[in-house]
Image (spheres, rainbow, N blue to C red):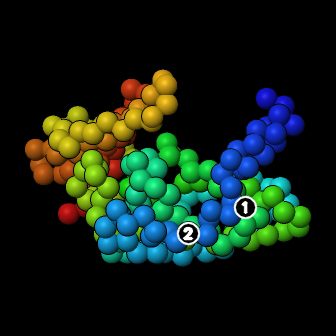
Amino acid sequence: MTRLAGLAAALVLALLLRPAEAAAGACSDSSIPDCQEQTQAPVGYNVWETQGWAYYCTGDHPYFWGLGYNYATNFSYDNSCFSAIENIFAEGVPPNKFDATFTNWCDGSQSITVTLGCSKQPPPGFGPACNYVGNPVDDPGCPSSNVTNHCSSGNPAVCFQTSTETCSNGTSYSCTTDLLVTWCYQCSG
């Protein structure tokens, strides 16, 4: 794809996303329980700059319920110069992650501040809470539970699977399988 074609595609997407809709509050979807707005640090962009960013829910409201869990957009941002595209397949593990691509469509440098709608409860279908220890590891091959398939609504559907594995020594893992590759995070406690 040429740079011009890429810019044209981004412009079409931006017009479809209507940046003005970003004014709704991050917790405006009332179906997300115990929703708490968490404001992130501002990020600067140059004119027509596009960047992908990951933001995280923290504290006692560590879960992000995004489009990947079939919930309305539960994030907002403060600058109408921007458009946002949620990258749902970059979310899910860890379950506190929001990932999006933002574009500044205005002349001159602009800053954007993102606010996430974060919950005390994990999204439906997501396994029990897991506080991650360290980096991802290969599949330990322990017995699985809470196996859940997550699929896009497109045709063909794109899917990944999450599960919880508990080994005979009591160590548990939160695992993801995508494109026949499994990786896991060890859970603390």
Amino acid found under the numbered disc labelled 1: Phe
Residue that label 2 marks: 24
| Disc marking residue 174 | none
**Which of the two discs, 1 and 2, sits closer to the camera?**
2
Residue that label 1 marks: 82
| x, y percent for residue 97 | 46, 58
| x, y percent for residue 34 | 32, 72
**Going 62% across and 50% down the picture, which residue do you hit?**
85
Please tell me which residue lies in front, 34 or 161.
34
Distance in Å between CA atoms under marks 1 and 2: 14 Å
| x, y percent for residue 102 | 68, 56
Query: Horizontal placement of 68 versus 5: left or right?
Result: left
**Going 40% across and 35% down the picture, which residue do you hit?**
151
- From this view, report whether residue 149 is shown above or below residue 49: above
- From this view, report whether residue 118 is shown above or below residue 171: below
Query: Horizontal placement of 46 versus 43: left or right?
Result: right
Residue 101 visible somewhere in the drawing: no
- From this view, report whether residue 79 is shown above or below residue 181: below
Instruction: Pick the quarter of the image with the N terminus.
Output: top right
Q: Secondary structure at mark 1?
A: strand
Please tell me which residue lies in front, 66 or 19.
19
Q: Mark 2: give few (<14), some (14-19) or many (20+) Cα within 10 Å.
A: some
